[in-house]
């Protein structure tokens, strides 16, 4: 769960001015979205994390999205589950790229979230990622590649991440077959 001392809709996850806004429909999404924030932190990307709901706090979301450019944000990552309208409504109120992360849901395992997020009408794009942790991490990586087009340090950080990942894969090719006795 979000650390209650650090939530309050204004958590700065970095002392530098945030370039990425990570928002989620509920503090209950933090269990998954912490992996997004962790990945951004590991890449040195200044970001902020907030719980804002398209349904429960719509005015707050409108204010957040419509002031995002003026506040210096360059990418917004929006996570929500179920009737997952957060990313779409955010995209409707900002010209910034919006990356959506569907959360797993109790009813349909996140398929409802995925479709709610992905099936945007033409003209208002949301780049929708995989359900759950993989989507949370990939949204962070993708946000970093977007920033890399303008900021050389984030391009370099992303390239180093990919290099390390490949090196680890090359070094760990061995699979230990399960023993017959189990
Ligand atoms: C969505 O409803 C949230 O993004 C969350 O995934 C889901 C459940 O929220 P809570 O009832 O746990 O606050 O809006």
Image (cartoon, rainbow, N blue to C red):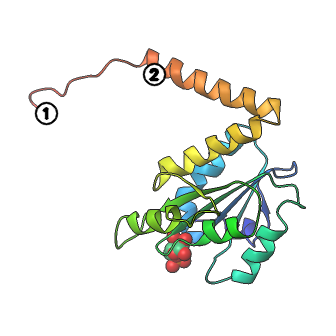
SS for dot 1: loop
Q: Position of residue 144 (x, y in %)?
A: 70, 40
Residue matched to label 2: 169
Q: Nearer the viewer, residue 175 or 116?
A: 116
Kindly report the distance in space between the C-alpha atoms of the residues bearing marks 2 and 1.
Answer: 26 Å
Q: Position of residue 5 (x, y in %)?
A: 73, 68
Residue matched to label 1: 182
Along the horizontal axis of the image, is 103 left or right of 60? left
Label total for image = 2
* Picture quadrant where residue 3 is located: bottom right
Q: Nearer the viewer, residue 18 or 83?
A: 83
SS for dot 2: helix
Q: Assess disc 2: are there few (<14), some (14-19) or many (≥20) residues with their C-alpha within 10 Å of its C-alpha.
A: few
The vertical placement of 19 against 126, above or below, is above
Q: Nearer the viewer, residue 16 or 147?
A: 147
Find out if the beta carbon at label 1 lies less than 8 Å from the nearest ligand 1 atom. no
Q: Residue furthest right?
A: 70
Residue under the image location 59 percent in, 21 percent down:
163
Residue under the image location 18 percent in, 28 percent down:
178
């Amino acid at each position: 769960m979000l650390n209650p001392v650090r939530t309050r809709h204004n958590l700065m996850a970095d002392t530098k001015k945030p370039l990425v806004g990570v928002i989620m429909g509920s503090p209950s999404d933090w269990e998954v979205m912490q992996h997004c924030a962790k990945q951004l932190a590991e890449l040195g990307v200044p970001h902020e994390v907030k719980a804002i709901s398209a349904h429960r706090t719509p005015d707050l979301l409108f204010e957040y999205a419509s002031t995002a450019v003026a506040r210096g944000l360059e990418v917004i990552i929006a996570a929500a589950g179920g009737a997952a309208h957060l990313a779409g409504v955010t995209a409707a109120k900002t010209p910034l790229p919006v990356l959506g992360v569907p959360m797993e849901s109790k009813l349909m395992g996140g398929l409802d979230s995925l479709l709610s997020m992905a099936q945007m009408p033409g003209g208002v794009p949301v780049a929708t990622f995989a359900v759950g942790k993989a989507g949370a991490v990939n949204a962070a990586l993708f946000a970093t590649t977007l920033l890399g087009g303008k900021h050389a340090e984030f391009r370099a950080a992303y390239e180093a991440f990919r290099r390390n990942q490949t090196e680890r894969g090359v070094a760990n090719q061995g699979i230990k077959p399960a023993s017959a006795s189990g």
